[in-house]
Image (cartoon, rainbow, N blue to C red):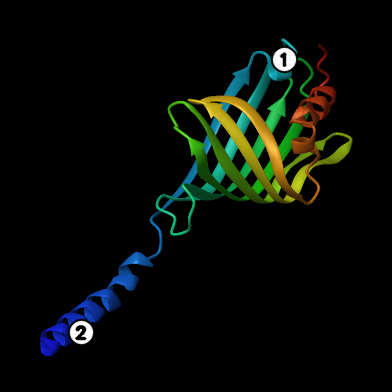
Amino acid sequence: MRRFALVVGIVAALGLGAMPSAVAANPVVNHFTFTESFTDGDFCGTGQAVETTISVKGTEFLAPNQPVDSRNVTQANVVYTNPQNEATVLRRAAGLVSDTLISGDPDGVHTVETTVRGLTGSLRTADGLVLLGAGYLVLHETFDGEEFVSREIVINKGPHPNAESDLALFCDVTTDALGLTN
């Protein structure tokens, strides 16, 4: 009986010893780039059209080996152009974003914890640079299915004036720089 227990123990140890290399493997990644152009017919609720071009380059971790549901590292550049006067605003963002479902059912009411590290946004206008946010930010965002309901800042380490303004700073600066009126 003692010998049987020893053999079972050795087999189990060998089996478990081989397991961490499979479990700790690097996550599956998807490298991507895309560019898209479109016209927003009601930019920031002004009722006026703005031409938008987005260029994104990133890496998406499809099966992250950390306790998160999704993770990506992305660099985005966006050009907003007022077709009436050709005024432009350039937006840039870059950093690491991870999302974790912390409560509820994704098909119903649920809350996602979003963690952002990096440049959450900057705007370059004819008058200079406006910082939308940089540093470390943790948000709890509530959705009903795919529909956004609310956002709460949980941790804010860095200036994040756009998040603190409930994203109003972006529209205030951009509509003014593009010469749009409400």
Most extreme residue toward the right is: 127
Q: Position of residue 121 (x, y in %)?
A: 72, 42
Q: Quadrant of residue 11?
A: bottom left
The single residue placed furthest to the bottom in the displayed view is 3
Helix, strand or loop under label 1? helix
- Among the two numbered marks 2 and 1 on one chain, the one whose residue lies closer to the N terminus: 2
Residue drawn 55% across the image and 28% down it: 143
Q: Which residue is mark 1?
A: 45
Identified at 64% across, 48% down, the residue is 116
Residue 10, label in figure:
2
Q: Nearer the viewer, residue 160 or 36?
A: 160
Classify residue 22 as left or right of residue 58: left
Disc 2 is placed on an element classified as helix
Image quadrant holding the C terminus, namely top right
Q: Is residue 173 left or right of residue 67?
A: right
Which quadrant would the N terminus be assigned to in this image? bottom left
How many badges with numbers are in the image?
2
Q: Where 15 sits versus 43, above or below?
A: below
Q: Is residue 1 left or right of residue 169?
A: left
**Residue 167 appears left or right of 14:** right
Percent x, y for residue 109?
A: 51, 27
